[in-house]
Amino acid sequence: MILTPEKAANEYVHLLEFLKDQDLLIDARKFWIFGNWKYKATGEVMEYGLRYFERAYQEELLHLFNENDWEGILQLPMGEYGRCATQIATRYCDSGEIVSLQVYEARPHEDGRTVGLTPGKVFIGEEGKAIVQWAKQIDQGG
């Protein structure tokens, strides 16, 4: 497992930024904003999933994330889509060759920026294949 670094006290580098900086992705977008990122090693399209949580569950989510308790995270009640500051995001290839995830908090009072509350975790090869089915369940849709 690879972890994204801390960039300020209790704030971690965003997962997508880290994946790009580590030269793990190919930018397959068209017109800069449309399209997908691809995993450089296999050329597979990276899927994206997002799940929201009410603030009351943030501490439990952080604990489960830090313990790698993926099933425990799925048991937490989902918050209303697009209306909760606490969220977990995942980027992965269907094959599981790469699976990455991170817990964020949206801060509208800070000009709408999002803060990585945890280090992003990147699982490559067999580690990714072991959790890809879980990652596919994260997206709550919109």
Image (cartoon, rainbow, N blue to C red):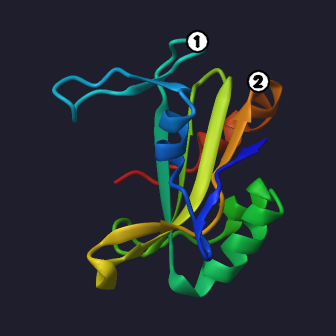
* Callout 1 crowding tier (Cα within 10 Å): few <14, some 14–19, many ≥20: few
Say whether disc 2 or disc 1 marks the residue closer to the N-terminus. 1
Q: Is residue 124 left or right of residue 90?
A: right
> Measuring 53% from the left and 27% from the top, which residue is drawn there?
23
Q: Which mark is residue 42?
A: 1
Dividing the image into 4 quarters, which one contains the C terminus? Answer: bottom left
Residue 132 in which image quadrant: top right
What amino acid is labelled 1 in the image? Thr
> Measuring 64% from the left and 51% from the top, which residue is drawn there?
4
Q: As drawn, which residue projects farthest toward the left?
A: 31
Q: As drawn, which residue projects farthest toward the front?
A: 8
What amino acid is labelled 2 in the image? Gly
SS at circle 1? loop
* Callout 2 crowding tier (Cα within 10 Å): few <14, some 14–19, many ≥20: few
SS at circle 2? loop
* Cα–Cα gap, marks 2 and 1: 11 Å
Label 2 sits on residue: 125
Q: Picture coordinates of residue 41 (x, y %)?
A: 60, 14
Q: Is residue 88 left or right of residue 126?
A: left
